[in-house]
Amino acid sequence: METKERPVSKFTSRLSYTFGAFGNDVFYAALSSYLIMFITSHLFNTGDKATNNRLISYVTLIIMILRIVELLIDPFIGNAIDRTKTRWGHFRPWVVVGGTISSVALLILFTNMGGLNKSNPWLYLFIFAVLYITMDIFYSFKDIGFWSMLPALSFDSREREKIATLARIGSTIGGSLVGVVVMPLVLFFSLQSNGGTGDDRGWFWFAFIVCATAFLSALAVGFGTREVENDLRKNEEDTAGIGAVLKMLVKNDQLLWVAIAYLFYGIGVNLVNALELYYFTYIMGFSKGFSILSFINMSVGLFSVAFFPFLAKKFSRKPLFIGCLTMMLIGLAVFSVAGSNLALVLFAAELFFIPQPVVFLIVLMIITDSVEYGQWKLGHRDESLALSVRPLVDKFGGAISNGVVGQIAVLAGMTTGATASSITASDRFTFKIMMFAIPAVMMLIGMFIFAKKITLTEERHAQIVAELEKTWGDQFSNESSEAGVLIKDDELTAMVPVAGKVVALDDVSDPTFASGKMGAGVAIVPSDGKVYAPFDGVVKTVFVTRHAIGLVSDNGIPALIHVGIGTVKMKGTGFVTYVNEGQHVTKGEQIMEFWDPAIKKAGLDDTVMFTFANSDLFEKFDVEVKPGAKVSHTDVAVKIEK
């Protein structure tokens, strides 16, 4: 007999998952930014500079190639996780196993493998490649499993939001804190400072602390969380591969152009961010200054994300994107002439950093909107595919950056044994071209593409969503071409979804609903903002702007609850949904809430429409509430017979 696990409290689950996010990003920061610094500044010291540089080039090239190869492996990782069935769930085993193996592998990569880098460099390169791809694959198992398990922790939308918010705070602090502590830890444990770069011992103990944190955080997720068992979590489809993503990009032009613009931008930004530690170490000769910058970035980053909703209300996305990149380019220009002036360097670096979280959110919003754009243009919805584009582009840009940074270190003489005093004027000029000029060109290309090719504005998206609303019932018209496909039982009694005053549907000011195109039903002027499930059924659609929900009853009858007229323009402001697509709801369960004053402040009609698709197929459709009557969600709205 299978033994059941002990339940855990909400507090324990939240805390464990937050610590998991913290450790996950601590690990990724060390892997993506500081492993390269260790390789270029400490790993190879054969006594022959040309040989050292050649080996560094080989290692960084191996890293770039393997990270790109790992992109092709990701879909198989997703499929393996989906198919995992254990008493501990789909995800937690992979978080623990992936976290353990990747931590051990990364720690070994932060060593010279017992001097093998000198005694047999070619064998070292081979073992390095095997260890790196092993580490990268198992980290991906952990990373994909960790973030994929969020919906499985709870089916309560409000609880999910709390967990997700705490996890994002944990990951932001984790990723930023590594930059704060990296050089103080390296120098503290080093026997020799080596001009501020530390030594092998210092870098090993830094890696040990990182890997131990990642390992313990994976264990915390494994033992401190529980996955909710429910039929809704059964996955019948394979995770899409890169081929499917590329095919979709060709068809969805807005998604394609935003991905290309973001790729150019991302390569430029990744290069600058990866080279900042090199700047403090080899240009300024003050590696600990990087900790000051990282601490400021951590604080400013949280403020920048919190400030985004205000900016989004004041400015449309395109001018905001261009404004952010302009500010970043000014920061690069100031940075390039700041020299060793710490105050000026920090000022320039913040000009460059502050807009980055805002740009990320702008791109994320456009990619999200492109889901509806693609649905409108192509006739089918590719939500998971579209949302996989951003991490795919991020990984590819990071892979290119990792490969290039090692070559820049070689070209600028910033390799084993180098210090700020050994860097020549020519080396400094080469480094600045690579750190400032090349990224600036990449970002300008991204800005140009965004300005010329992105036409999916907020207003256009609202129009598209409004057009898609009108096609809500079409899917059921197709599905119900054969009698009895949808309507299986003889009747359905549907309750009023919201309290208020009844009005005749044909009297509402929206011609689409008044004409009956959306089906027969009832309209209600709400007295409060709470919306309840009118019957037992499944959530078919939650509109992205959260103002409408499509339901299908347990006996197969589709219905739409639409709050307000023209409220799609509010882009979700003032609306909260408590359910997700595919979730089963029971009659009387609260599924949505809206703030009525927000609708009225926007100058819009707050009437709630409750309609049934294909109502002409019913033998009997009786509206049980009369115009002018005051009703609550416990009153019967309509009775339907097949």
Image (cartoon, helix red, strand yellow):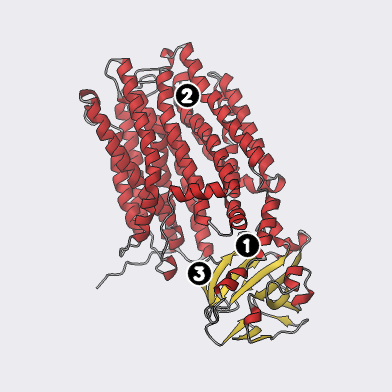
Between marks 2 and 1 in the image, the one whose residue lies nearer the viewer? 1
Amino acid at circle 3: Gln
- Identified at 32% across, 63% down, the residue is 85
Q: Residues within 10 Å of mark 1 (few under 14, many from 20)?
A: many
Q: Position of residue 21 (x, y in %)?
A: 43, 49
Q: Position of residue 258 (x, y in %)?
A: 58, 43
- Identified at 55% across, 59% down, the residue is 381
Q: Secondary structure at mark 1?
A: loop
The circle drawn on residue 280 is 2
Answer above or below: position of 193 versus 157. above
As rendered, which of 63 and 173 lies closer to the eye? 63
Between marks 3 and 2 in the image, the one whose residue lies nearer the viewer? 3
Q: Quadrant of the N terminus?
A: bottom left
> Residue 116, located in which quarter of the rendered image?
top left
Of the residues under marks 1 and 3, which one precedes in the sequence? 1
Mark 3 and mark 2: Cα distance apart in space: 52 Å
> Residue 639, located in which quarter of the rendered image?
bottom right
Of the residues under marks 2 and 1, which one precedes in the sequence? 2
Residue pointed to by mark 1: 546
Mark 2 and mark 1: Cα distance apart in space: 47 Å
Amino acid at circle 1: Arg
Q: Quadrant of the C terminus?
A: bottom right
Q: Secondary structure at mark 3?
A: loop
Residue pointed to by mark 3: 583
